Image (cartoon, grey):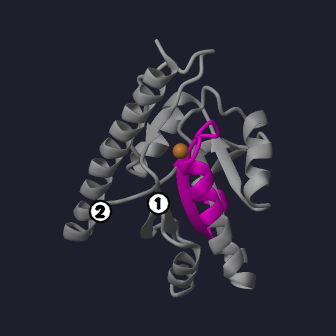
């Protein structure tokens, strides 16, 4: 296969992934506006970048800004984490009330060792969580996150993951407050979060 074809294939896979995630997300957002009883979030038990098991109860009393992704992600996740970190910094001292939480949807590659420098790169208070495949599956289901391994071999055993990129603001009681879509500007997120604190 030529280089050109490989890049073309990659583009198609990324595009299909984006469309799937978009369809899934529009269903979620329309669901939750039509039906306010649609729940997002809930109990989880995962392992943070320091190897410590963390549950939803550990975050009680703090707001969480939760998003899902994977460290091998070439573009979407780094952008999301940069925007989320910027929004929290824009909140100044109030930002201390909000804990940014990144949950991997690629636990096979995203080990504790991998998550530690990745999290530190984006925000000093970012909590990055991994776990067993079933634990990740349960957390993603609770947060209505779609993810799947992309059907394209990048060589050397590398692969991409398709996943939805929504950020969830959860209250000190662990309840869902609102979501932000990928691409939401940091200043708009900061203002929207401030209105909830
Ligand atoms: Cu990603």
Above or below residue 8? Residue 171 is below
Q: Is residue 59 magenta?
A: yes
Find residue 135 and report its horizontal and vertical position in percent: 53, 36
Secondary structure of residue under mark 2: helix
Q: Name the residue rendered at 57%, 64% in the picture.
A: 65
| Pointer 1 local density, CA inside 10 Å: few below 14, some 14–19, many at least 20 | some
Whether label 1 lies within 8 Å of ligand 1 gets the answer no
| Pointer 2 local density, CA inside 10 Å: few below 14, some 14–19, many at least 20 | some
Give the side of residue 142 with respect to residue 66, left or right: left
Whether label 2 lies within 8 Å of ligand 1 gets the answer no
Q: Residue furthest top?
A: 1
What is the distance, in whole Å, between disc 1 and disc 2 at their CAs?
A: 13 Å
Above or below residue 84? Residue 120 is above
Residue on which the image places disc 2: 29
Q: Name the residue rendered at 41%, 26% in the picture.
A: 9
What residue range appears in magenta? 57-83
Find residue 115 and report its horizontal and vertical position in percent: 73, 41
Find residue 151 and report its horizontal and vertical position in percent: 41, 23
Q: Is residue 71 visible?
A: yes
Give the side of residue 101 with respect to residue 10, left or right: right
Check residue 182 in the rendering and tell me which mark sits there, or answer none.
1
Q: Name the residue rendered at 39%, 58% in the picture.
A: 40
Q: Is residue 76 magenta?
A: yes
Figure quadrant of the C terminus: bottom right
């Amino acid at each position: 296969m030529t280089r050109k074809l490989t890049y073309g294939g990659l583009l198609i896979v990324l595009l299909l992934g984006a469309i799937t995630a978009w369809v899934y997300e529009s269903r979620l957002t329309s669901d939750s506006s039509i039906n306010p009883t649609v729940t997002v979030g809930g109990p989880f038990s995962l392992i943070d970048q320091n190897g410590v098991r963390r549950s939803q109860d550990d975050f009680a009393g703090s707001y969480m800004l939760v998003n899902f992704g994977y460290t091998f992600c070439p573009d979407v996740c780094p952008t999301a984490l940069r925007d989320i970190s910027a929004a929290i910094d824009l909140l100044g001292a109030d930002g201390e009330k909000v804990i940014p939480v990144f949950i991997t949807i690629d636990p096979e590659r995203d080990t504790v060792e991998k998550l530690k420098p990745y999290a530190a790169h984006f925000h000093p208070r970012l909590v990055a969580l991994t776990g067993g495949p079933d634990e990740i599956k349960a957390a993603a289901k609770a947060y209505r996150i779609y993810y799947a391994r992309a059907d394209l071999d990048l060589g050397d055993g590398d692969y991409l993951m398709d996943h939805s990129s929504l950020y969830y603001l959860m209250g000190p009681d662990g309840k869902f407050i609102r979501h932000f879509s990928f691409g939401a500007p940091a200043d708009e997120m900061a203002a929207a979060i401030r209105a909830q604190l």
